[in-house]
Image (tube, rainbow, N blue to C red):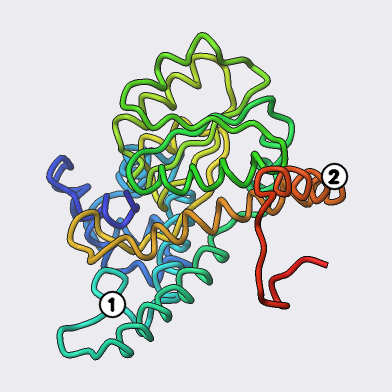
């Protein structure tokens, strides 16, 4: 959940904390220069009360909360200005107009996903995958499809990736896990029960966990050793489809694959060519553009 959303859910807060939370939401565009003294003065509270609210929300003090609000406000003001991620088209749109809007949505998603990628976190995730004996993936529903796509690509490099699509079956793999493995869990909401259960299992076994999830705090993120943030624009149920979240998942997984490939580009190309030719011996094309030399 985004910090702004947490600040809007004030039912469990004291009257003073509710006043501070509402003030922060109303003045979120002024966070660069805000002080606890100003907030306290304008909400008839105290600087200590501002700090207590920050700590209640999981921050060490007001400064980390202030930085998070600045980051969120900046993120939400970028991209997707001309298209609604939840309802990108209307009834009166002709098919070609719908195609243009879906394409625009994809372009905005790609730019947004790139802007959210943290270079240090990406390097850590790639290092864990490159060094791992086996990469274990936890995902359900649509993220599971993209996990299987990642598995197929990685296997063509001769790298072991395990994805289990049977409900409950991943929990039976616990005895086979080793500390030189790594895990990768995908959940847009960060609250998918089956994915959370698998993530907890990986943590029990001491396996480093990479998480792909939305911006903001959630249960899955709190279990992660490394977090890669997905485009965070869609509502859980009222969206037309997961156009942005699904594409963002695929882009991040494709980026991980590309980085692993590049870590040994000659060896990766050799392995992929050998495995692909052996797996698809009869593959051919009449198009000169598609034919191999």
Q: Quadrant of the C terminus?
A: bottom right
Front residue (pair 116, 167): 167
Front residue (pair 279, 233): 279
SS at mark 1 in the image: loop
User: Is 159 positioned to the left or the right of 194 in the image?
Assistant: right
Residue, disc 2 = 267
| Residue at the image position 67 percent from the left and 36 percent from the top | 129
Q: Position of residue 256 (x, y in %)?
A: 63, 49
Q: Position of residue 193 (x, y in %)?
A: 29, 31
Front residue (pair 244, 208): 244
Q: Position of residue 41 (x, y in %)?
A: 29, 60
Q: Residue furthest top?
A: 175
Q: Establish if 266 lies above or below 95.
A: above
Residue, disc 1 = 88
Front residue (pair 223, 34): 223
SS at mark 2 in the image: helix
Residue 90 image-quadrant placement: bottom left
Q: CA distance from mark 1 to mark 2?
A: 43 Å
| Residue at the image position 56 percent from the left and 40 percent from the top | 151
User: Is 208 positioned to the left or the right of 16 in the image?
Assistant: right
């Amino acid at each position: 959940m985004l910090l702004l959303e947490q600040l809007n859910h004030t039912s469990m807060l004291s009257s003073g904390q509710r006043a501070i939370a509402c003030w922060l939401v109303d003045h979120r565009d002024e966070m660069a220069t805000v002080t606890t003294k100003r907030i306290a003065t304008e909400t008839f509270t105290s600087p200590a009360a501002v700090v207590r609210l920050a700590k209640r929300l999981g921050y060490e003090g007001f400064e980390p909360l202030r930085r998070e609000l600045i980051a969120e406000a900046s993120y939400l003001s970028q991209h997707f200005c001309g298209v609604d991620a939840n309802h990108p088209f209307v009834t009166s749109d002709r098919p070609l107009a719908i195609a243009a809007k879906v394409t625009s949505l994809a372009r905005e998603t790609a730019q947004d996903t790139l802007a959210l990628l943290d270079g240090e976190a990406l390097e850590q995730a790639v290092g864990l995958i490159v060094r791992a004996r086996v990469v274990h993936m936890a995902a359900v529903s649509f993220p599971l499809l993209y996990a299987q796509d990642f598995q197929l690509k990685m296997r063509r490099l001769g790298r072991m990736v395990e994805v289990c699509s049977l409900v409950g079956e991943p929990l039976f793999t616990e005895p086979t896990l080793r500390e030189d493995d790594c895990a990768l869990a995908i959940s847009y909401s960060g609250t998918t029960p089956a994915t959370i259960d698998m993530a907890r299992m990986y943590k029990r076994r001491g396996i480093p966990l990479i998480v792909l999830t939305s911006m903001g705090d959630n249960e899955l993120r709190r279990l992660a050793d490394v977090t890669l943030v997905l485009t965070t624009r869609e509502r859980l149920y009222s969206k037309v489809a997961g156009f942005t979240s699904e594409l963002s998942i695929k882009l991040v997984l494709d980026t991980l694959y590309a980085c692993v490939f590049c870590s040994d580009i000659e060896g990766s190309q050799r392995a992929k060519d050998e495995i692909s030719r052996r797996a698809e011996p009869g593959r051919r094309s009449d198009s000169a553009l598609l034919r191999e030399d």
